[in-house]
Each structure stands twice: as C-alpha cells, then as structure tokens.
Image (spheres, rainbow, N blue to C red):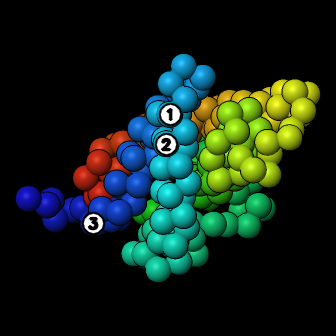
C-alpha cells in the first residue's frame, strides 16, 4: 500500500536497469581474467542495458528522461557548491550532480565495454572484432588492456562517489534514496 505522502518517481524499468547494472558491473569487475566467458557475457549484458536505458531516456516516464536530469555544467557546479554549504535544493528526480553522474557512468561504461570488445578480439581472437584485431601486436594488446582497465577502474571510482553522494543526499534531505530506488517512491 502506498503512503499518500509519497509519489512514484522511478519506474519499474529504471529500477530494474539500475540493479541489473549493479549486478553485471560487479560480475564483470570481479571476474576479470579468471572467468573469461562470464566476464565477456556480463560485458555484453552491460552494453544491452545501456542501449535500452538510452532509448528509455527519450521515451520513458518523465523522471527517466534525459531532459529531466541532464543539466548545464554551470548548474552542476552551482548545485555541488550548494551541497558543500548544506543548502542544496531537493529534487524529486535526479539532482544536477546525480544527472552528471549518470552521464559519466554512461561514458565510463561505454568506453570500458568497447575497449573490452577490442581487447577480446586482439587478445583472445574472439568476439565481433576478432578478425579485425587478430594481427594486433603484443604491445598493442598491452595498451588495450591498460585502456580497458583504466575505464573499469574509473567506473568503480564513480560507483564509490555515487554511493557517497547518495548517502550524503539521503542525510541532507532526510530521505532514503536507496529505498526509493527499490520501491520507486519518494516523499512528495
């Protein structure tokens, strides 16, 4: 039963996407070289999730749309400054910093998955780019591996910052943002 002081904010797709992305990124990050098939398939799953979320960013429910949470860089800076002085405005959907984090996640994950596909083709001679990357030198493979690892680690850093931001915002505005991403509702 829904509390009358709450409104639906995060639709089922957004919540499913979020937690599926959490799971697939964790699997990808933790499997690395040890379970290559699992690593590769979870990487493909991340790409599929991102593609679906990209489409949903244009046709989804109001708070799922990019137009609701992608702000100009000046507004992100202003909001971040207001957070530091504990006077940030509360947003029903993503705040400007949260919206910027979504964009950074997209960039980091797209670059991690694309570099992974290229590396997989060069190093394992497998995947959709295997024939194109089969002649890559060992030094090229090493560079590709460093690039892939950089974007995976960059994304992990974003996860840590995101978690810190969620906890801080939850305390600042006295609302449980984690619970909101589970049940889809926030205080009106």
On screen, 105 above or below 150? below
How far apart, in angstroms, are the residues tagged by discs 2 and 1? 6 Å
Are circles 2 and 3 on residues that touch, CB within 8 Å?
no
- Nearer to us of marks 1 and 3 is 1
Q: Position of residue 180 (x, y in %)?
A: 32, 51
Residue sitting at 50 percent across and 34 percent down? 37
Quadrant of the snapshot with the C terminus? bottom left
Q: Position of residue 23 (x, y in %)?
A: 41, 38
Residue sitting at 47 percent across and 71 percent down? 56
Are circles 2 and 1 on residues that touch, CB within 8 Å?
yes
Q: Position of residue 81 (x, y in %)?
A: 71, 47
Question: Depth check: 5 or 54 in front?
Answer: 54
Q: In the displayed structure, does residue 28 sit left or right of residue 79? A: left
Q: Secondary structure at mark 3?
A: strand
Residue sitting at 30 percent across and 62 percent down? 12
Q: Earlier in the sequence, mark 2 or mark 3?
A: 3
Q: Badge 2 is on which residue?
A: 41
Q: In the displayed structure, does residue 84 sit left or right of residue 77? A: left
Q: Badge 1 is on which residue?
A: 37
Q: Secondary structure at mark 1?
A: helix
How far apart, in angstroms, are the residues tagged by discs 1 and 3? 42 Å
User: Residue 7 got which mark?
Assistant: 3
CA neighbours of label 3 inside 10 A, class few (<14), some (14 to 19), many (20+): some
Question: Depth check: 122 or 95 in front?
Answer: 122
How far apart, in angstroms, are the residues tagged by discs 2 and 3? 36 Å
């Amino acid at each position: 039963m829904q509390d009358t002081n709450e409104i639906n904010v995060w639709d089922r797709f957004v919540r499913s996407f979020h937690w599926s992305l959490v799971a697939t990124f964790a699997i990808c990050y933790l499997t690395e070289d040890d379970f290559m098939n699992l690593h590769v398939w979870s990487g493909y799953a991340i790409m599929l999730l991102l593609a679906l979320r990209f489409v949903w960013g244009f046709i989804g429910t109001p708070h799922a749309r990019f137009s609701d949470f992608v702000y100009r860089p000046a507004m992100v800076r202003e909001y971040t400054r207001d957070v530091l002085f504990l006077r940030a405005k509360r947003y029903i959907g993503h705040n400007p910093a949260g919206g910027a984090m979504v964009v950074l996640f997209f960039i980091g994950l797209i670059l991690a998955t694309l570099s992974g596909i290229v590396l997989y083709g060069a190093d394992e001679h497998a995947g959709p780019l295997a024939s194109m990357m089969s002649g890559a030198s060992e030094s090229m493979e090493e560079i590709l591996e460093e690039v892939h690892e950089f974007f995976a680690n960059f994304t992990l850093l974003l996860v840590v910052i995101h978690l810190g931001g969620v906890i801080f915002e939850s305390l600042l505005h006295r609302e449980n943002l984690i619970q909101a991403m589970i049940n889809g509702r926030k205080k009106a």
